[in-house]
Amino acid sequence: MASSSHSMAEREGGGGEEEEEEDETLEELEGFDDFTLASSWERFISEIEAVCRLWLVDGPKNLMEKSAESVGSRKNLYKVKCELKYGLKLYCMEYYFETSRNGKAAHWDDDLHDLQLSFGVAEFLVIAPLSASGVVLDAPESSKLLSAVAIALSNCGSNWPAFVPVHDPSRKAYIGIQNMGTIFTRRFDGDRIGSQVPIRLMHLEGLYELFVSKFALSSVDFSTSCFKVRFTMKLTYRTPPYDDDEIESVEREAKEPGRDPDGLNLIKTQWDDDCPWTEWYSAEDPVRGFELIAVWLSRTFEGSLEMAELENASSFDAEKWLIYPIVSPNMLDDSVGKFVGFASQLRLLVGALDMSFEAQFLEDFLSAENPGSDISKSSTAIPPPTVLDRVLKELFHDGIQGSDCVELENKYSRAIKGAPLDSLFAQFCLHSLWFGSCNIRAIAFLWIEFVREVRWCWEESQPLPRMSINPNIDLSTCLIHQKLQMLAICIRKKNLFNHPNCTENKDHNSSDSKVDFQVDLHKEPMDDKSDSYYSSLRSDWQHDPKGPKQTRISLSKDPNDVIPSTNLQPVDQVRKGSAGVVGSMMLLNSFQEMHSPYTQDAPIMTEDMHEERLRAVEAFGDAFSFSGQLERDVLSSDMSAFKAANPGAIFEDFIRWHSPGDWEDDEMEDKSRDDMSWRPHGKLSQRMSEHGNSWRQIWNDSPALPISEQKPLLDPIREGEKVLHYLETVRPHQLLEQMVCTAFRASADTLNQTAYGDYKHMKTKLSQLYLTLASSLKPLQAKHWPNKAELIGDLKQLCLVFEHIEKLVILAASIHRKLLKAPRLSEAIFSDYFNFYLPKMGTSLTSMCYDEDFDTKQQVMVRERDAVASLFPPPTANQSWRKVLSMGNLLNGHEPILREIIFSVYDRVSSGHYGSNIPMATTEEIETHRMYICGTSNDLRAALSVTSWD
Amino acid sequence: MMDSSSLSQPEFDYLFKLLLIGDSGVGKSSLLLRFTSDSFDDLSPTIGVDFKVKMVTIGGKKLKLAIWDTAGQERFRTLTSSYYRGAQGIIMVYDVTRRETFTNLADVWAKEIDLYSTNQDCIKMLVGNKVDKESERVVTKKEGIDFAREYGCLFLECSAKTRVNVEQCFEELVLKILDTPSLLAEGSAGVKNNIFKQKPPQADASTSSCC
């Protein structure tokens, strides 16, 4: 501001200040150009002065742009520094400044630097020797240093307070001085008692008296005024540690002998017993505890008795409660191997995928000579047979029959080409993650045994466990899962074939008992809509005109139409495979009701079969007479069945039933057939009646056979064997690709089941995870990997992403369950941590280091106080003997771990008396004494600021 | 399939797979025939699938369109699901003179697309065929537009018989595909080297170009 105009006056005034310092060399202040005459101390002062002037001129804004660095995680405190030499010693001077604080900081602002809090200053200088301790040990040196800074500051007309560290570093002791215009000087002194705190100073009363005693020592005359001491207090409580008695020996030792148990020993309690991941691993509770801060806002006291009363006050009386979780530092440690969870195992699985290209068959990994020389022993170990037995038992015998609990899955889950969480293959993948060290050999070993078990189910016609009973194959899943679905269906069909009586075909009438696995075309609901589609078709049929008269004039104009004997003979052939009469439709040539036949199910196909058909069509190109063989087979089967169910039926009958759109009611052209009014009028559509129509050709070629006598469209024996052949010969990398996708999806689905309340950030992040997984795993489905190393690298990166989310989910679950009754608060706390954690997730390969612990506090609403207080259960007998309580303000029997107090007294002064250059006390009151006290019953730190005029 | 050598210099910039679906008899095959060989015939009902290739130049790009024509009969529906795979564009056809062919689009066909399409971004197009039979029309243009809006499709009415709007229909669909980067990436000539290894069949339609 107007500092340059002040500077002259201040320089003159500065001389007065320096008298008390033990300087002998400084006679004159002006004209100090000739440095040859100056002592080293003078040169030191002028050096400081030069630096300070530079800083002053620049101001915070420019300094920020130049070289200032932020201090810790504080949003708004920055520092610049420079090194200075005095004699043989190097000193470092730092200027701390704020950028955006408007006016004075609140007493208990979290963002405050220790010196700001202790002495009630905003910007400040610190000068300290560049030594290991950074502390000025000898008293003359410190006061000399401080006076050098004071002189320099005063020379350049600055009001910055300056501090010098003194004594032992553990004492955190400082002395300081601030030039406050022409008259005032503020002095600072802070020190600490690390042990053996006098009993008097353990209590508020004693601390109050300590503060008051400072006035008496002061030269100012306070005797007439009654001391109105302002007081504010901040108490910090910490939730008790989990009692060691509750340590449960973790029941995992039997589970994974091959796994190194480090990290698991730390687990004290099974806090996550009912969390979805505990089926696979136990997580360390990321929330070590909570710290609760109770703040008594500023109030005025007039005597030590009042202080004593306050010490008995409940912490519920405090105006403000703030809370934050003490989060385990492991949350922020991404180094590989530190965190054991899905993410760590997925990383191993990706490693196995990388190895899987080294061999043609899975068996090769198990053969003796294979293990490469460079592979360390532990990464190739195969778990003992007992582990294998347990895993297979869990997979095949403990599993409930597959349930379609789709609702538990995230809506994006299906975008990942894996398998549903409960399915056999997904469970296989999850087991593999934890099978030994999830190396390629262990996986190969488990897979071979797994396939052997699957084959056993097939041979013994046992239903495959953990497979849904959905008769369709979900093409959005991975191929192995599709194959297993196919196999499950084949096993069911095989069983129906062998034991037709215990079937699900309830609607067969007795004459059709031979009809086995086929279901009527018209009774196989694809969904509700297709039913309505059918009923609309049927209503078409019912509109067909019909009459009672029987005639036998052939409708056919086509010479190719061979409808041989049926035209002539009365229908005496045996009707076979009828599923019932179709409405009121009559056959054209025989006065018979039309019967709908049982038809074969359209064959189900796995993805590779679909692709095979595509390729076949593509290969034949436009020559469509060759394409659609399967459709032809289906059509032929339907025609055969129709013929069997309707002896005497002709092609037109079939079309009327099968493709009603191709039967045109057209009475206009029926001139020649007036006498046959009983029969349905109409004709085939143009396209159906053309010469060489392929439908008619197929009709002619199809024998009358009920489906029970037909060759099945889907041969369950053949298809089942094909599936097993696939499973038995799958290439290692094909298996691993699908395992990676499925394992990622199943892990995400498992985490997604975690109860963590309504945390929006977490929900969004999980959804994002699914999308990331889907897009990152997509390249795995490509036939060729142009750059394998890059893909593997991407997948490892994906594991890190997964680890972040996994840790956050665990944290969310932990916070959620601890503050169940304060959902707003718990979400706010989580969201604070989430934002703190967020930068980590943005970074790529490098793991990000955090210098600061998480300590963002959330204010506790009054109605939430009970929920928070319940985090502090009354101490057990076991806990209470440990501590002798010596402080007051207990919370549920817990004393604060830290008590911070600020005392201050103000004095009314008139501005005219003190001059106009005092920024702080322009008109009415000036803080003459301020004391910050911080500590416990055996550790006390006090910092005193005294403003005086000399 | 036999001569894969011809692929060394792809004679097109992009290959797109388009699929025609809709009820039996709405004129899918006729549309395809009109587009690929500019003729109109009463065609034998499709059994299973038919497909034609047409080279066109649209938006300055040489394109090879493989257009798959499926059977509309209910019975073939599950088998048809194979052909949805990898399609960049799906044309839903209905007959403006038969309401049920229109209602079935919502009830049946749109669901089939959701179920079987492997391509998230694939472009859907709604086509009302047989507008030449204006006197028999039962589905209004407005209904078509409303449907297209609800399902996020392109929409056109056309007649395979009179050629009205047939070329525009395919052109608009292809332009939209060209506007969609993910589809473009799939269709780029280099990627699809495992498919269509042989030269386009010497069928009548193979080299006619459009626009």
Image (tube, grey):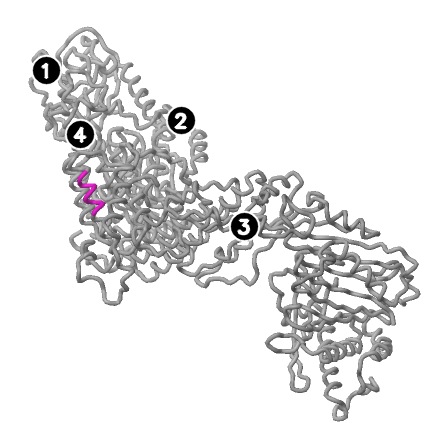
Query: What residue range appears in magenta?
Result: A449-456
Q: Which residue is drawn at 54% across and 47% down?
A: A878
Q: Residues within 10 Å of mark 3 (few under 14, many from 20)?
A: few
Q: Label 2 is found on which chain of the structure? A: B
Q: Nearer the viewer, mark 3 or mark 1?
A: 3
Q: Where is residue A561 in the image (x, y as percent from the top left)?
A: 11, 24
Separation (CA) of disc 1 from disc 4:
29 Å
Q: How many labels does the image show?
A: 4
Q: Is residue A801 left or right of residue A150?
A: left
Q: Do the residues labelled 1 and 4 touch (CB within 8 Å)?
A: no
- Tell if the residue under mark 1 belongs to the same chain as the one under mark 4: yes
Amino acid bearing label 4 = Asn
Q: What element carries label 4?
A: helix
Q: Is residue A578 left or right of residue A129?
A: left
Residue located beneath label 4 in the image: A495
Q: Which of these two is toward me, A327 or A444? A: A327
Q: Label 3 is found on which chain of the structure? A: A
Residue located beneath label 1 in the image: A574
Separation (CA) of disc 3 from disc 1:
85 Å
Q: What element carries label 3?
A: loop
Q: Residue at x 82, y 64 (%)?
A: A919
Residue located beneath label 3 in the image: A241
Amino acid bearing label 3 = Pro
Tag 4 or tag 3, which sits nearer the N-term?
3
Q: In this view, does B57 lie to the left or right of A100?
A: left
